[in-house]
Image (cartoon, coloured by chain):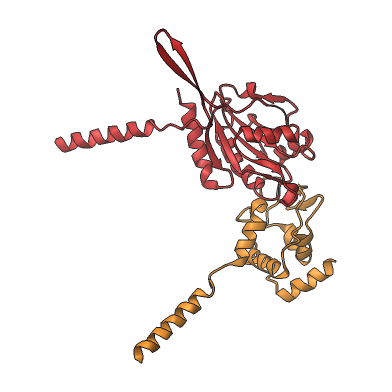
């Protein structure tokens, strides 16, 4: 009898622990102190990715407003990238298929090659990749702005004459919560990170 | 005396084993580095963006040009198993004839068995003809 009670308690404890997994809020936060009566109250201002406004492969403007309240996963790529981008697109497609039809999950793929990746080129890329998820946006803007935005996502993207394709960029997938706070990074070139990202998106969808 | 002979024998065994990794598959390493990103680790391709290698009629029909295709890339539309592909395939100028031989033989052995294995001599001759 005692043994059954012990096992039941253990099961409850384990299941409770599983539900309580949370993702950290990444980035440099600010602390604002203010006086309230006789006490000093400190508010934490969490880091958020900067504002952006890009043209999507559907010829629509997409800005930070469009992802407000949505769980977002983003990457930086270019369509003629001969190295890691095809692998990243392959892996992002698996994530997109998992959340197809879910308007609470957005996928942003920022092209870093403004010279080549025009809206029609991005449209062709999305079509050839058979992207059916209408919440996945392939986007383009000025190169300098995208390099700056990458810094805001705390990853690197830059020109490099010695790199294949003349550009280098991180292969990371960046997970944002509904307030555009960075919650996790994944290696977009690793298939095993796809499931981790899917699990974490579900986790954030259920977050209070 | 016996002990010193034994020590020398053991040392030789260690040296021989340590001199090289006999299990290393250069073809696999090169394929993974230069081909698999687009064409997939199993040669399955990527949707309608990058064509497959496995079961690709284009590859079988153009075996004779394979060395040149890999060395100088492909720019323009190609038809693979009835489907059009137009993504540019970059050239691989830094790969040696030995590298190309290893990649082709890896593909022939592991991905597309209809592809014929090639010798280094054949690849060298084809490389020369590309120019």
Q: Is residue B6 above or below residue A66?
A: below
Q: Is residue A55 above or below residue B52?
A: above
Instruction: Tell me if residue A156 can be seen.
Output: yes
Comparing A158 with B130, the one in front is A158
Q: Give residue B122's position: percent from left, percent from top.
A: 75, 74
How many discs mark residues in the rendered view?
0
Q: Is residue A76 above or below residue A70?
A: below
Left or right of residue A198: residue B125: right
Q: Give residue B84's position: percent from left, percent from top.
A: 77, 48
The colour chain B appears in is orange
Q: Give residue A70's position: percent from left, percent from top.
A: 56, 25
Left or right of residue A42: residue B47: right
Residue drawn at x 58%, y 39% as measured from the top left = A173
Q: Give residue B69's position: percent from left, percent from top.
A: 77, 60
List the single residue furthest toward the top: A37
Instruction: Tell me if residue A132 can be seen.
Output: no
Q: Which chain does red denote in the image?
A: A
Quarter of the figure that contains the N terminus of chain B: bottom left
Residue drawn at x 63%, y 53% as measured from the top left = B40
Left or right of residue A77: residue A11: left
Residue drawn at x 35%, y 87% as measured from the top left = B3
Quarter of the view holding residue A185: top right
Quarter of the figure that contains the C terminus of chain B: bottom right
Comparing A47 with A95, the one in front is A47
């Amino acid at each position: 009898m005692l043994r059954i009670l012990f096992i039941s308690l253990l099961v409850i404890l384990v299941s409770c622990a599983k539900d309580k997994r949370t993702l950290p809020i990444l980035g440099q936060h600010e602390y604002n102190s203010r006086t309230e009566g006789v006490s000093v109250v400190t508010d934490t201002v969490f880091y958020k990715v900067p504002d952006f406004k890009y043209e999507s492969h559907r010829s629509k403007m997409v800005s930070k407003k469009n992802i407000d309240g949505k769980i977002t996963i983003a990457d930086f790529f270019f369509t003629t990238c001969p190295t890691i981008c095809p692998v990243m697109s392959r892996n992002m497609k698996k994530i997109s298929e998992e959340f197809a039809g879910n308007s609470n999950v957005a996928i942003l793929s920022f092209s870093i090659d403004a010279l080549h990746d025009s809206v029609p080129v991005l449209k062709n890329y999305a079509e050839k990749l058979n992207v059916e998820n209408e919440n996945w946006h392939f986007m383009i803007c000025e190169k300098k702005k995208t390099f700056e935005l990458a810094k805001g996502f705390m990853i690197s993207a830059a020109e490099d004459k010695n790199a294949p394709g003349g550009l280098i960029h991180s292969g990371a997938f960046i997970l944002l919560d509904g307030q555009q706070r960075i919650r996790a990074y994944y290696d977009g070139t690793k298939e095993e990170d796809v499931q981790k990202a899917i699990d974490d998106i579900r986790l954030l969808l259920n977050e209070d | 005396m016996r002990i010193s002979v034994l020590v020398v024998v053991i040392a030789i065994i260690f040296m021989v084993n340590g001199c090289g990794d006999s299990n290393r598959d250069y073809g696999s390493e090169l394929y993974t580095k230069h081909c698999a990103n687009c064409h997939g680790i199993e040669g399955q391709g990527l949707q309608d963006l990058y064509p497959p290698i496995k079961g690709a009629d284009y590859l079988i029909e153009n075996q004779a040009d394979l060395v040149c295709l890999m060395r100088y890339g492909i720019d323009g539309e190609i038809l693979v198993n009835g489907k059009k592909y137009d993504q540019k395939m970059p050239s691989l100028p830094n790969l040696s004839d030995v590298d190309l031989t290893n990649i082709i033989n890896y593909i022939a052995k592991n991905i597309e068995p209809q592809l014929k294995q090639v010798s280094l001599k054949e690849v060298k001759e084809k490389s020369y003809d590309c120019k």
